[in-house]
Amino acid sequence: MNRIKEVLEEKGIKQVWLAEKLGKSCNMINAYAQNRQQPRLETLMDIANILDVDVKDLITSNKPS
């Protein structure tokens, strides 16, 4: 699971903008944001760089807290 959607909302950034920056389709970014598909590690790192966050901020833990 990832937190891409939450981070985009926190920063006020649209999925379309991220898609353009990444060179990916809007459908692909939406699939990432809705957790229907998980990005490859390289893509996740690119997203973190574009959004200026630590890659750890884009990942949710499966462990109970």
Image (cartoon, rainbow, N blue to C red):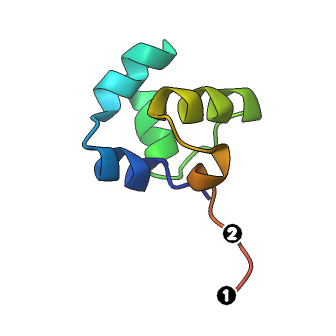
Q: Residue at x 50, y 35 (%)?
A: 52
29, above or below 12, in the image: above
Q: Residue at x 50, y 18 (%)?
A: 22
38, above or below 51, in the image: below
Label 2 crowding class (10 Å Cα cut-off): few <14, some 14-19, many 20+? Answer: few
Residue wearing tag 2: 61
Secondary structure, mark 1, is loop
Residue 9 pos. (x, y %) = 30, 50
Q: Amino acid at mark 1?
A: Ser
Residue 33 pos. (x, y %) = 45, 46
Residue wearing tag 1: 65
Disc marking residue 46: none
Q: Amino acid at mark 2?
A: Ser
Q: Which residue is at the front of the view, 1 or 11?
A: 11
46 sits left or right of 12 in the view: right
Residue 20 pos. (x, y %) = 38, 15
- On-image quarter of the C terminus: bottom right
11, above or below 16, in the image: below
The total number of labels drawn is 2
> Is any part of residue 24 visible from this angle?
no
Q: Residue at x 72, y 33 (%)?
A: 40
3, above or below 50, in the image: below
Label 1 crowding class (10 Å Cα cut-off): few <14, some 14-19, many 20+? Answer: few
11 sits left or right of 29 in the view: left
58 sits left or right of 61 in the view: left
Secondary structure, mark 2, is loop
User: Pointers 1 and 2 in contact (CB under 8 A)?
Assistant: yes
> Is any part of residue 41 visible from this angle?
yes
Disc 1 to disc 2, how far (Cα)?
9 Å
- On-image quarter of the N terminus: bottom right
Residue 57 pos. (x, y %) = 58, 54
